[in-house]
Image: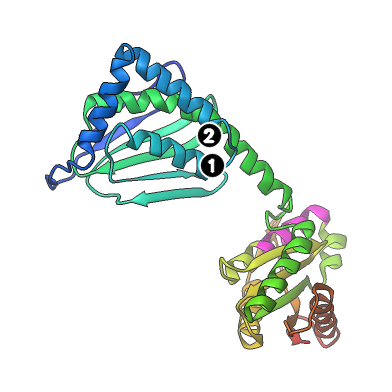
């Protein structure tokens, strides 16, 4: 069964659908008594509409005390659970990329797409083994009005923080983020006795691209190489644009052998890529310097060795890696 067009008409924020599971799951009676008791107490304090308005106001004030997306969603769902049963939920937003999932995602469900004007605030889905009653959905929709503005502010704040740490051209981490991250990762590796490796990467013959095709073509090469580096390493590794056509990668829990495998993967990925600029195919290649953390290394020492190894890779032919 699909129900569309149900929502808060004053805000225009919600599109909902309910999907009935093919299995008629057993009705879950957990916490029903406490939920009914909470409703009765709220209604005894005044009329039902007044009680829910007061609840909505209290929820809105509480959610506005933080700019953390995860905290806001968790607080909202905790409040919902005090008044209606659910077995799990999932919230996700694409920009910035964030997903929060709790409990199971099977059975009956209700889905809400949240937005204010042109601002997309993600989607929220609730799941449980039996159908959601109309009165429960009405309550949920009323309380969603208390969520959207604090959520919008938190998403804007999260996006601003991410932008402050990102290189505008490539979308990877920037130089200032590198300076903070490398010190933290070295300290963690020393404390835990774990491995850490660094790759310093430079695009070969980059000046020739700029001189021949212009700086816009050079920017396209930089963007492409950044994407290829990201695709060649793990999600747990850190990619930075260090400056110009130079990148740095921090490989967590990686010794020299693993670092060399990653370097080979990056070399092959860039070497076989095709960058097309104004119907011209531009060949690309990189040189890589590899260094592996020692017990006494500082950030400058680890980087210095990788940088010298990069120089050797350039000096001895390019399109290769050298180990410090």
Residue 233 x %, y %: 59, 71
How far, Cα to Cα, is label 1 from label 2?
Answer: 7 Å
Which of 33/177 is in front?
Answer: 33
Range shown magenta: 214-226
Q: Position of residue 89 (x, y in %)?
A: 35, 44
Of 241 and 313, which appears nearest the observer?
Answer: 241
Residue pictured at 78% horizontal, 72% vertical:
202
Residue 306 in the image: above or below residue 180: below
- Which residue lies under the disc numbered 2? 151
Image quadrant occupied by the N terminus: top left
- Label 1: how many residues lie within 10 Å, few (<14), some (14-19) or many (20+)? many
From the image, give the main secondary structure of the stretch colored magenta.
helix
Q: Is residue 29 above or below residue 177?
A: above
Image quadrant for the C terminus? bottom right
Marks 1 & 2, CB-CB < 8 Å contact: yes
Residue behind mark 1: 69
Whether residue 3 appears in this view of the structure is no
Locate residue 210: give its quadrant: bottom right
Per the rendering, the mark at residue 180 is: none
Q: Secondary structure at mark 1?
A: helix
Along the horizontal axis of the image, is 235 left or right of 307? left
Q: Residues within 10 Å of mark 2 (few under 14, many from 20)?
A: many
Question: Hey, which quadrant is residue 229 in on the image?
Answer: bottom right
Q: Residue at x 79, y 80 (%)?
A: 297
Is residue 232 within the magenta segment?
no
Q: In the displayed structure, does residue 260 sit left or right of residue 207?
A: left
What is the basis of the colouring in this image?
rainbow
Q: Is residue 90 visible?
A: yes
Of residues 212 and 195, which is closer to you in this image? 195
Residue at 32%, 21% (x, y): give it. 42
Quadrant for residue 91, please give it.
Answer: top left
């Amino acid at each position: 069964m699909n129900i569309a067009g149900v929502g808060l008409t004053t805000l225009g924020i919600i599109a909902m659908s309910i999907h009935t599971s093919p299995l008629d799951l057993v009705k879950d009676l957990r916490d029903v008594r406490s939920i009914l008791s909470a409703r009765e107490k709220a209604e005894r304090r005044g009329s039902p509409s007044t009680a829910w308005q007061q609840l909505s106001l209290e929820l809105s004030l509480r959610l506005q005390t933080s700019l953390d997306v995860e905290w806001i969603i968790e607080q909202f769902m905790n409040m919902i659970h005090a008044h209606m049963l659910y077995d799990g939920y999932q919230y996700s937003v694409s920009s910035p990329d964030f997903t929060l999932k709790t409990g199971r995602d099977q059975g009956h469900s209700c889905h809400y797409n949240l937005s204010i004007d042109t601002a997309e605030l993600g989607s929220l889905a609730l799941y449980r083994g039996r159908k959601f009653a109309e009165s429960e959905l009405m309550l949920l929709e009323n309380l969603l009005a208390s969520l959207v503005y604090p959520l919008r502010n938190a998403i804007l704040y999260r996006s601003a923080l991410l932008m402050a740490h990102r290189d505008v051209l490539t979308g990877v981490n920037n130089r200032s983020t590198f300076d903070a991250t490398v010190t933290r990762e070295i300290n963690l590796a020393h404390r835990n006795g774990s491995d850490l490796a660094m790759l310093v990467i430079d695009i070969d013959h980059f000046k020739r691209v700029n001189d021949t095709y212009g700086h816009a073509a050079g920017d396209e090469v930089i963007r492409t190489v950044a994407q290829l580096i990201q695709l060649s390493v793990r999600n747990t590794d850190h990619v930075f644009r260090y400056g110009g056509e130079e990148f740095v990668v921090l490989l967590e829990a990686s010794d020299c052998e693993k670092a060399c495998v990653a370097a080979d993967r990056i070399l092959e990925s860039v070497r076989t890529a095709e960058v097309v600029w104004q119907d011209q195919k531009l060949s690309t290649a990189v040189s890589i310097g590899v260094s592996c953390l020692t017990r006494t290394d500082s950030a400058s020492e680890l980087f210095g060795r990788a940088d010298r190894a990069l120089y050797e890779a350039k000096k001895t032919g390019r399109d290769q890696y050298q180990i410090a």
